[in-house]
Amino acid sequence: MPASLQLDGLGKRFGPFWAVRDISFSLEAGEVMGFLGPNGAGKSTTMKMLAGFLTPSQGSARVCGADVVGEPMAARRAIGYLPEGAPLYGEMTPSGLLNFVAGVRAMRRPERKARREWVAERLGLAAVWNRPIETLSKGYKRRVGLALAVLHDPQVLILDEPTDGLDPNQKHEVRQLLREMAAEKAIIVSTHILEEVTAVCSRAAIVAEGRMLVDESPARLFAGEPPDLVFRRLTLGAGA
Amino acid sequence: MTVLRIAKRELLSSFASPLAYVFLCLFLALAGTLTFYLGGFFQRGQADLEAFFAFHPWLYLLLIPALSMRLWAEERRSGSIELLMTLPLTTAQAVVGKFLAAWVFTGLALGLTATLWITVNKLGQPDNGVIAAAYLGSWLMAGAYLALGSLASALSRNQVVAFLLAAALCFLFLMSGLEVVQGLLRGLLPPGLASALAELSFLTRFEPLSQGALELADLAFFVLLIAAALTINALLVEMKKAS
């Protein structure tokens, strides 16, 4: 059985600039990896390659055995992806957009109905179910984005800043949801909130200047030190 | 199936904004004005719609870019392209789906001008076969304008730029058949080349269609142009989606 997620020397170059270089790791169901790093470190670029939005310049990535370049449809079917900033079709309603995505993902009617009800309940979308997305608050928009990512119950979840813009209660809800889903899925979450990593993740990866510096369990990485101190030391070098 | 889902979403979305209604009203108002005033519908004293169809190349030049401009530019500006293009669908499916939505919408606008068709039947005995054929030809030509407009829309994330690019592109395909331009071209280019360019013109190609003569060569011209423009469109989306 192939790993849920397998990256081998994955890299992306924009012109002369390497945004991501030589990232390798594998992730199994039951693991949650926290993706940490300064802005512009290459976190989003890596996630975009895994989701099939960007083509890697070097290396390869496999999702449940399917190569993201060679078998893009199989890879995309196995993935739920929340893009950075959770872009949505503003003129549509959550209900309409979920229906569209369920249709493109070829979900059958009974399954579609059950999953729609599940995301509406778990992400608290019932109150805004039929309102145009552009009229919703940032927190609701983010949750609609999350709902689209988890709708088809994917084996791999790639979430780019899923708790950005949520209030503390909503953050708690989303973390709760991630912990629940973690048992049977492989999940990557990027975040700027270091406590989130300790709270949800079983692995913490720090990325800076396109390279992966650390891949450890949060307990060992932070080892009782204040997380932001560790983060600064690793990403700015020993002098900071 | 996926293509139809994309087309349906796109079509429903266009009706969610006032743009669709403004477009339909403007289309009908302009089509009517051109036919009755510039076309001299009544003065002609003939029970046909030639005065109506003759203006379609010019009507589309102004209005179709307004319809096509948001197809890809808006996806890229809002970032929703990242949502769309990470779903299990191909770029070709997305391009064709969006094009179909806009084409069906144009068909609707064209269908609403059927009041003119009814009018002309009240006034006399027109050749309805000719009119039906001209409608079909006009819709096909609208598809060519749309495909070029969709291509232009993939070039910029700014809708105004997309509009102007589309209008410029369509204008080139119009102009090459104009008598004035042809006269100039014949002086500058070898005669074979000048007339070859005329063959590529919407005006030259649409004229027989507007009179109800559905020539295979003219129909094939528009179909091939649509296919070529959409192919380039898909390549542009691939190249530009992440920038």
Image (cartoon, rainbow, N blue to C red):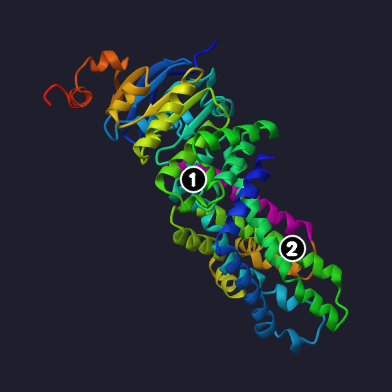
Question: Label 2's element?
Answer: helix
Predominant SS along the magenta part: helix
Q: Chain of mark 1?
A: A
Q: Quadrant of residue A202?
A: top left
User: Which residue does the image show at 64% across and 53% down from the upper left?
Assistant: B101
Tell me if B77 is positioned left or right of A114 in this view: left
Q: Which residues are magenta?
A: B215-243
User: Which residue does the image show at 27% across and 13% down from the upper left?
Assistant: A220
> On screen, B2 above or below A49?
below
Amino acid on which disc 2 is placed:
Gly
Q: Residues within 10 Å of mark 2 (few under 14, many from 20)?
A: many
Report whether residue B115 is seen.
yes
Q: Quadrant of residue A214?
A: top left
Q: Which mark is residue A88?
A: 1
User: Which residue does the image show at 64% across and 34% down from the upper left?
Assistant: A112
User: Which residue does the image show at 81% across and 79% down from the upper left?
Assistant: B120
Amino acid on which disc 1 is placed:
Leu
Mark 1 vs mark 2: give the one in front. Answer: 1
Tell me if B11 is positioned left or right of A131 in this view: right
